[in-house]
Image: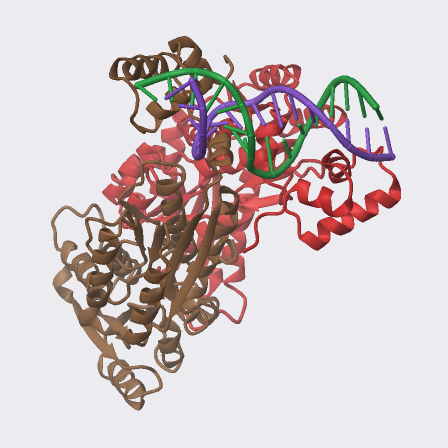
Chain colours: A brown, B red, C purple, D green
DNA sequence: TTGTACGCGTTATCAA
DNA sequence: TTGATAACGCGTACAA
């Protein structure tokens, strides 16, 4: 209950001035070792906790942060991260943080390079980036390391030991979960498909991880100890993966219709991106026993979820990804907090029945 | 980006002193009307935004908050709200907020009355309360209103127009969701049960709401437009509710065994409290087609979820309830923000496969 | 009715 | 290597 301990108190107890305590506190040097030790001891004894309010007021610093992500007007998914980033920016404004967002066209590598270059040239104090292009991102990471600019990755996981943090979803686990959602409660044997729509799978790590998780779910059903569930022998499930082009291509309808008509035992489809809504219309024309699972609470997806064509959507908390991503930078730069190297956000299972809590929350 | 506008800037532009601007800003009176108007105009023109950092530092006020909730050592559920409240308290400490928690024995009304009385006598600046006892809470609300003490309700919803906010779950909707989770994918007709364990249903609003939601889920299946799903006619489902005593009573096992053995077509059980783990052991001894759904990520529940006996758990975000509950008070008292009168937290659907993201997050 | 001056806890800039 | 002191932006006595 004692009043909060201030620098002044430590100074008095150690018979030095506040200036000296401050130098010890921030390792600014220029202080005799024995004095340093005494001050540190007093800090321990009094359990000093710095007052962040006063600190930010006194420091009167400003931090310029840059965020690099796909343009939210070109792809609806990216609206949510954009919102999250700006929400965080508003809250952090009073701590002297300003934000500039660099948006790139996610279908064009040159656009990414251009915006990342612009961000770098602005010499920000920290960078938040959704590195959709694996190969093209690495050189920037290296450059930022040399310039000592802390950077945080979000949404797309790239192994990088030097990044302050990765904030995003666990793609492998989400594929695993999708398997469960498709198979759960299905009494009969049959086929499950994973569909990739317009993805450059080679240069996209997380799509591969999703497929691996998906297949592993069915593989582990084979394990003997699976509790008391009456599922058919796992060998009865066939898993197949299908690559679809952009939906505007004629071969999209062609390939999809072929799948739906040829695979008589098709029990479910897992769409590895947020574009489940492009497949949904085709299902209404076919036997409705085919269960559809996809990602993200886009307006189009929500429509089919409510209609019943989409059974479940996996929410990757995109808004929170942006929000916590920017906060990770602030924690590092402003609040000098420990920042977790890895922050997975929950994979929310969304059905028609709990949808309302996730839209506009 | 022009420098942040300060009170001093307004004062200069309006040819008055900072004291006058301050009085206008906080409606302290004692300022000529024409001067007041001029100052207000300047504030608009310069788009003045108060610096909360400097404000809290300057004001140097302290706020004593009281939280009233069931003892977390007597019932494991209440550990999470307790954690959330304390997490918020730690963050808010630097804004001059101190917290005292008053814990009551949720099985004893007199304990509740005692602690609520203690909290009231401490004359706090704000109160956060989980009002499990409906009737007994109302007089306290009245008293707090008279004393002008703002109070926030959490976890248990009680209609009260005067409360600053209610933070918690939508009980009706969670029952509805539970219906879906039990029925989903079940091809055959049968019976679904909702089990209440050791609950005083008459004095507990949210248990009633859960049951209503649960029954309504099956009722709405009767509606004609339900999309393309191959469920049997809704009349084929029988819904029954069962009241169980505390599990230490002999009649607990008796009643439960009776249910399991007599209801040959029992497809699922929905436990309306966090005590699904008390029913789970009985299921392993019976035909495993009975699906079990309950609430909350208690250690015991998690055990049976991983084992497969419990199919889904609905997470009511108890930790967040405490966290945001306390923040609602801080927003009102310290930050002078608008506080939403109602804040529903998400109903997370937890399966074995996405569990990991919700424990210790 | 208005203005002045000090304090909040910290940082940063000088002298010493 | 130290210590005194002016900011930072705002709240609040108290004086005018």
What residue is at 54 percent from the left and 54 percent from the top? B216
In the picture, measured across the screen, residue B284 lies left or right of residue B77, that is: left
x, y percentage for residue A212?
17, 61
Q: Is residue A146 above or below residue B356?
A: below
The residue depicted at 66 percent of the width and 48 percent of the height is B48
Towards the viewer: A15 or B136: A15
Where residue A324 appears, as percent x and y from the top left, is: 39, 48
Q: Nearer the viewer, residue B322 or A194?
A: B322
Q: Residue furthest bottom?
A: A250
Q: Quadrant of residue B65?
A: top right
For this rendering, which residue is in front, A237 or A361?
Answer: A361
Please state if B33 lies on the left or on the right of B126 as rendered: right
Quarter-of-image position of residue A214: bottom left
- Residue B303 percent across, percent down from the top left: 27, 37
Rendered residue at 45%/14% (across/down): A9
Q: How many marks?
A: 0
Pinpoint residue B137: horizontal percent, then vertical percent. Answer: 65, 26
Residue A322 sits above or below residue B270 on the image: below
Instruction: Judge whether residue A337 can be spotted in this image.
Output: yes
């Amino acid at each position: 209950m004692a009043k909060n301990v201030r620098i002044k108190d430590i100074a008095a107890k150690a018979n030095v001035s506040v200036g000296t305590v401050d130098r010890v506190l921030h390792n600014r040097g220029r202080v005799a070792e024995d004095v340093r030790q005494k001050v540190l001891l007093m800090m321990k004894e009094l359990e000093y906790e710095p007052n962040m309010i006063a600190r930010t007021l006194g420091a009167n610093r400003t931090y310029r942060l840059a965020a690099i992500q796909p343009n939210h007007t070109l792809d609806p998914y990216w609206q949510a991260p954009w919102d999250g980033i700006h929400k965080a920016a508003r809250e952090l404004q009073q701590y002297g943080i300003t934000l500039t967002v660099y948006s790139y066209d996610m279908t064009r590598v040159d656009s990414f390079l251009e915006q990342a270059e612009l961000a770098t040239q602005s010499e920000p104090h920290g960078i938040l980036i959704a590195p959709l292009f694996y190969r093209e991102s690495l050189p920037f990471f290296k450059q930022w390391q040399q310039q000592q600019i802390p950077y945080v990755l979000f949404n797309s996981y790239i192994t990088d030991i030097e990044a302050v943090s990765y904030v995003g979803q666990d793609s492998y686990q989400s594929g695993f979960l999708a398997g469960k959602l498709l198979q759960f409660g299905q009494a009969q044997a049959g086929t499950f498909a994973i569909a990739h729509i317009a993805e450059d799978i080679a240069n996209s790590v997380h799509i591969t991880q999703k497929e691996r998780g998906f297949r592993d779910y069915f593989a582990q059903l084979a394990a003997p100890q699976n509790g008391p569930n009456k599922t058919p022998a796992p060998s009865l499930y066939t898993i197949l993966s299908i690559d679809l082009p952009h939906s505007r291509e004629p071969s999209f309808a062609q390939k999809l219709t072929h799948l739906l008509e040829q695979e008589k035992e098709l029990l479910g489809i897992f769409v590895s991106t947020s574009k489940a809504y492009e497949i949904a219309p085709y299902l209404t024309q076919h036997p409705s026993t085919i269960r559809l699972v996809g990602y993200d609470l886009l307006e189009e997806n929500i429509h089919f979820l409510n209609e019943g064509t989409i059974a479940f959507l996996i929410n990757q908390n995109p808004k929170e990804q942006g929000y916590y991503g920017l906060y990770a930078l602030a924690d590092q730069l402003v609040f000098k907090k420990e920042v977790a190297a890895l922050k997975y956000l929950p994979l929310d299972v969304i059905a028609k029945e709990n949808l309302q809590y996730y839209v506009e929350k």
